[in-house]
Image: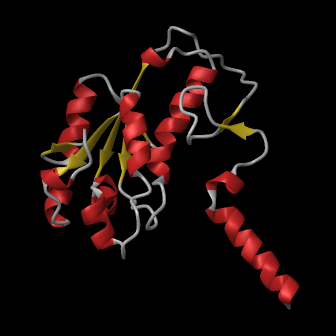
Amino acid sequence: MKILKTALFLSALTLTNPVFAQLEGFKTGPVIDEFGPTAAVQTDIPIAAETQFKIAFDVAKKADAGNLNRSIESAARFINMHVAAGVPAGNIKLAIVVHGGASVDLTKQKLYGARNDGATNGSADAIAILQKHGVEFRLCGQSAAAHKINNADLLPGVKMDLSAMTAHALLQQQGYTLNPF
């Protein structure tokens, strides 16, 4: 029985710890080393080095308390895999539109901790790193109002939009496409 409990504990640790959860062959970088692992893939459809990406990510699902929001991590994965495939980082422009329960993932520690039993915002460092790489973070004002989040509660650099629908419409007019993942 003790062996079974130990095995279950180690399995849970592997699934919840990003260092252990990385699959063989996946690695971070070449742009963002802290998170966003990808695997090298032999593709049948090459990506030209002059390719321009303008992608909007839609994030509504809140991260488990204290964890990095996986949808936010997807932006790092996108950057890492495409730069590794030969697209210059300057050709990649990403915007992350956040609404619904994920709204709290864009807040400073004081509010985040108050809403998550004192847990540390596991997305805050990732947001700061992604912003250094030009990723925009835009919060739905309607979700912010529903979740009682004010502009002063937001992490540095996060912008408040009238709504997520507005943000997506404006980004689309600027040539952004919606990433469905």
Q: Residue at x 28, y 72 (%)?
A: 114
| Quarter of the image that includes the N terminus | bottom right
Q: Judge whether residue 181 can be spotted in this image.
A: no
In front of the other: 84 or 108: 108
Task: Identify the image quadrant of residue 112.
Answer: bottom left
Q: Residue at x 22, y 39 (%)?
A: 167
Q: Is residue 141 above or below residue 156?
A: below
Q: Is residue 60 left or right of residue 78?
A: left
Q: Is residue 64 above or below residue 92?
A: below
Q: Residue at x 81, y 76 (%)?
A: 7
Task: Identify the image quadrant of residue 150.
Answer: bottom left
In the rendered image, residue 110, in percent from the top left (x then y), is placed at 26, 63
Q: Judge whether residue 113 can be spotted in this image.
A: yes
Q: Is residue 51 above or below residue 105?
A: above
Task: Identify the image quadrant of residue 145.
Answer: bottom left
In the rendered image, residue 68, in percent from the top left (x then y), is placed at 48, 54
Q: Is residue 93 above or below residue 167?
A: above
